[in-house]
DNA sequence: CGTGTTTGACCAGCGC
DNA sequence: GCGCTGGTCAAACACG
């Protein structure tokens, strides 16, 4: 398996676009020092942890129960609505979720890259950084900057090989990627050098 | 001055 | 019940 054509057909469009977007972005970035390739999806830690093709990006995918936007953010609902943290009266944050909900759409992939931040077309705002147990590398937390969109992602370097970046997306965007919109509007302006055909199977 | 990042503290879930 | 850990908040800070 090679190339960028292994996204499942039942994947939400935005994640297909994500792959698409990456292909798009690759031609904008200087990827001479990047080794980026998307392989088949795999079940998280399904036996062969990370001893396969070391140049391959691994993807975890939980399509069983995609979360609709209205389902997704309800329980989180304290989006900057002015609750200054524990002034005098500690607001009961029962809504806070520390563990990811079962069934919440999640996709993760591993990328060999020196860059931790890869522009996937969405605008992300960093809201946290945390060192995790058994890992020398900190984990960074990002939230989609789009109004009303509660998608989050975590970015961390792989413990065993810091040249790999593990990116985990939680939730489904309630909007399209700006870069995708741009691409859809300007299809004829794609230079010859762009390799937009790479992710063709995901949109057939 | 507006926007985004950093960072320390808080909180809740989970395992023992 | 307690401590550990991961996830989040928000004030302070940096940068354009």
Image (cartoon, coloured by chain):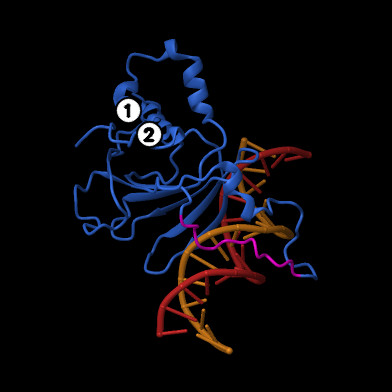
Chain colours: A blue, B red, C orange
Q: Please name the residue that numbered disc 2 is placed on.
A: A19
Residue A92 in the magenta stretch? The answer is yes
> Which of A66 and A130 lies nearest the eye of the viewer?
A66
Q: Residues within 10 Å of mark 2 (few under 14, many from 20)?
A: many
| Image height of A199 relative to A108, above or below | above
Q: Mark 1 lies on which chain?
A: A
The range drawn in magenta is A90-102
Q: Residues within 10 Å of mark 1 (few under 14, many from 20)?
A: many
Residue A194 drawn at (x, y percent):
34, 20
| Image height of A59 relative to A181, above or below | below
Tell me which residue sits at (40%, 45%) in the image.
Answer: A63
- What main secondary structure does the magenta stretch of the protein show? loop
Q: Residue A199's mark?
A: 1
Residue A83, picture quadrant: bottom right
Task: Point out the tag, 2 or 1, that comes first from the N-terminus.
Answer: 2
Tag 2 and tag 1, C-beta contact below 8 Å: yes
Tell me which residue sits at (69%, 54%) in the image.
Answer: A78
Tell me which residue sits at (51%, 31%) in the image.
Answer: A177
Q: Residue furthest right?
A: A88
Left or right relative to A185: residue A73: right
Q: Mark 2 lies on which chain?
A: A
> Which of A26 and A96 lies nearest the eye of the viewer?
A96
């Amino acid at each position: 398996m090679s190339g960028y054509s292994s996204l499942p057909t039942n994947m939400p469009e935005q994640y297909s676009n994500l792959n698409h977007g990456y292909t798009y972005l690759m031609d904008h970035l200087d990827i001479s020092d990047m080794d980026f390739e998307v392989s088949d999806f795999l079940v998280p830690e399904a036996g062969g942890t990370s001893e396969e093709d070391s140049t391959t990006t691994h993807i975890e995918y939980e399509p069983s129960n995609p979360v609709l936007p209205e389902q997704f953010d309800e329980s989180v609902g304290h989006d900057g609505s002015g609750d200054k943290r524990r002034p005098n009266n500690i607001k009961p944050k029962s809504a806070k979720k520390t563990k990811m909900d079962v069934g919440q759409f999640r996709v993760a992939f591993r990328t060999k890259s020196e860059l931790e931040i890869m522009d996937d077309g969405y605008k992300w705002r960093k809201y946290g950084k945390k060192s995790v147990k058994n890992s020398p590398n900190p984990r960074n937390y990002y939230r989609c900057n789009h109004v009303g969109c509660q998608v989050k992602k975590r970015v961390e370097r792989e413990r065993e090989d810091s040249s790999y970046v593990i990116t985990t997306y939680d939730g489904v965007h309630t909007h399209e990627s700006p870069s995708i919109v741009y691409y859809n509007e300007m299809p004829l302006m794609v230079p010859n050098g762009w390799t937009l055909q790479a992710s063709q199977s995901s949109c057939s």
